[in-house]
Amino acid sequence: MEGAVRLFAGEFSQSTLTVPGEDEKSVAWVVTPFSAYCRQVFLAGALVEVQEQGDMLSFRVADPTGGFDLVCGGKNTPLAESIHKIPLPSFVSVSGRAQLYRREGKAVPTIRPDQVHVIDRLIRDQWVITTANSTLARLELVHCALKGTCTDSRILQVCSYYSLTVKELGELAAMVAGALSGVRPSQETDDAKQADPREMIREYIRTASGPRGVAVEEILEMAAMRAISKEAVLTTIESLIVEDECYQPQKGYVKPL
């Protein structure tokens, strides 16, 4: 199973490179200037704009570094209708497919969403922290490539195509630091700890799973007793799936990997 990539809009928006998939049936990767090979992506931010363009629905999700442009096919589909019902601005999480097309000779990176969920500020901040960690890990590999100590052909291809410099790595590191500066300090209270569902849900999936895993409805019931919203639970499960922490052996069930 291929996990979804987490990256900031400020990096994704600079992408101009695509790399073909493994065979004719595989989807191409959108490759960012700092070595993120993207097919499936998982992002979070504020839904700030929704527009209809013919039969298409376009919308914009802003994170602390910029904005993701998303395009949804069919303005009357259930997904498009659910997006229309979300008040602006609202924090949302999105899982979808990265794509890049050319318009008037310019590369335009976009996301075609599969799922969109309303989330709260706490979950958005968790996404910022996790995305910052994965971004900095990629920057370290690129830095090694620039020093000649990395032999990963995919990273070397990125460095060559984008003509990367140490200065540009520093600029992205500063962007990551700026994103982290907007994260609210965690509150050392029981209520605040209880408001964070991620570790609780991950542990519950691990301990309660049987041969078929554990039913999503069972997780929802457990979370409801702890005053955790259904939306927060579903978003957390989705995040755990795209990060390969767990998977769906059948509809309505999840199981740890």
Image (cartoon, rainbow, N blue to C red):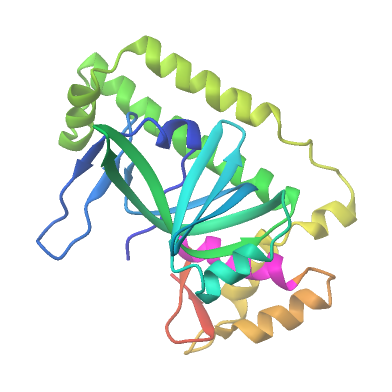
Asked whether residue 243 is in view, the answer is no
Q: Residue furthest top?
A: 167
Q: What kind of secondary structure does the magenta stretch mostly adopt?
A: helix
Residue at 71 percent across and 79 percent down: it is 220
Look at the image and tell me whether residue 168 can be seen: yes
Name, please, the residue furthest toward the left.
24
Residue at the spot 84% in from the left edge and 52% down from the top edge: 192
Quarter of the rendering occupied by the N terminus: bottom left
Indicate whether residue 12 is drawn in magenta.
no
What residue appears at the point 29 percent right and 35 percent down from the top-left corner?
107
Q: Relative to 2, is 162 above or below?
A: above
Number of dots carrying numbers: 0
Left or right, 55 with respect to 216, comes to: left
Q: Nearer the viewer, residue 12 or 57?
A: 57
Q: Nearer the viewer, residue 190 or 184?
A: 184
Quarter of the view holding residue 65: top right
Of 208 and 159, the residue lying toward us = 159
Percent position of residue 150, x then y: 22, 26
Q: Is residue 172 left or right of residue 216?
A: left
Q: Is residue 145 above or below residue 230?
A: above
Residue 59 placement, left or right of 22: right
Q: Going 60% across and 47% down the picture, which residue do you hit?
A: 127
Extent of the magenta region: 230-242
Name the spot of residue 76 as percent of width and height, x first.
51, 73
**x and y, in percent, of residue 41 in the image:** 42, 52
Q: Position of residue 167 (x, y in %)?
A: 39, 10
Quadrant of the frame with the C terminus: bottom left
| Direction front: furthest residue | 54
User: Vertical placement of 186 versus 233: above or below?
Assistant: above
